[in-house]
Image (cartoon, coloured by chain):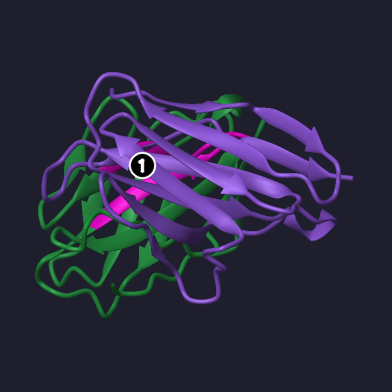
Chain colours: A purple, B green
Amino acid sequence: GAVVSQHPSRVICKSGTSVKIECRSLDFQATTMFWYRQFPKQSLMLMATSNEGSKATYEQGVEKDKFLINHASLTLSTLTVTSAHPEDSSFYICSARDPGSNSEAFFGQGTRLTVV
Amino acid sequence: DAKTTQPPSMDCAEGRAANLPCNHSTISGNEYVYWYRQIHSQGPQYIIHGLKNNETNEMASLIITEDRKSSTLILPHATLRDTAVYYCIVRSGNQGGKLIFGQGTELSVKP
């Protein structure tokens, strides 16, 4: 099946710094990608929908100025966690799908962010 | 998108069939049933999806009731590597592709 690659897989950063996470679709073009966050023992929570060439659509309660999303090409979306705090420590996961009305979504391997 | 209800956890003996139920009583006519699983500290993995008819692939079978209000994912011969959280998700085909995850079922396959 289609492959979605996420980088880095783990990152540790200091409070107040920014961290960029990349999500790439390796063998298909994704006009839309999705970013999720997952805290320990909890389910995935959708943060935002990343649209190629336009602004991202954020879910209710997600701060768009804190979680910057850029989808500059059909194969790459980036999530930047700005001015990170310890409470931003989480597992961040992206997904993408081949265009189509009912095709499945494929997920990256996730990024474990730890803010110290 | 319709909500789903799944048991929080289930056990299964290795080599036996694992039958994971999902209730989606408010599903509408154009909504598909998707199943994903997540092994600890990894991204979710697609398993199977269907609209009305039962579906089978190399990983699993999906049985959807005639009224479409519930479904069952069947892993025919569970192995220890099938231990994971299994998510049943209902999604409309024209909703732009986003998947909203519920709490899922934590399946433990035991030797």
User: Over which residues does the magenta segment extend?
Assistant: B33-48
Residue B73: tell me if it is visible: yes
Residue found 10% across the figure and 66% down from its top = B30
Look at the image and say whether residue A30 sits in the magenta stretch: no
x and y percent of residue A12 in the render? Answer: 80, 35
Label 1 resides on the chain identified as: A
Of residue B8 and residue B2, the one placed in the foreground of this image is B2
Please provide percent x and percent y for residue A73.
29, 33
Q: In this view, does A108 lie to the left or right of A53?
A: right
Q: Which residue is drawn at 58% across and 26% down?
A: B81
Question: Which quarter of the rendered picture does the N terminus of chain A lie within?
Answer: top left
Say above or below: B14 vs B101.
above
Q: Quadrant of residue A23?
A: top left
Provide the residue designation for mark 1.
A71
Image check: B1 left or right of B85?
Answer: left
Residue B47: tell me if it is visible: no
Number of disc labels:
1
Above-or-below relation of B22 to B54:
below
- The quarter of the picture where residue B28 lies is bottom left
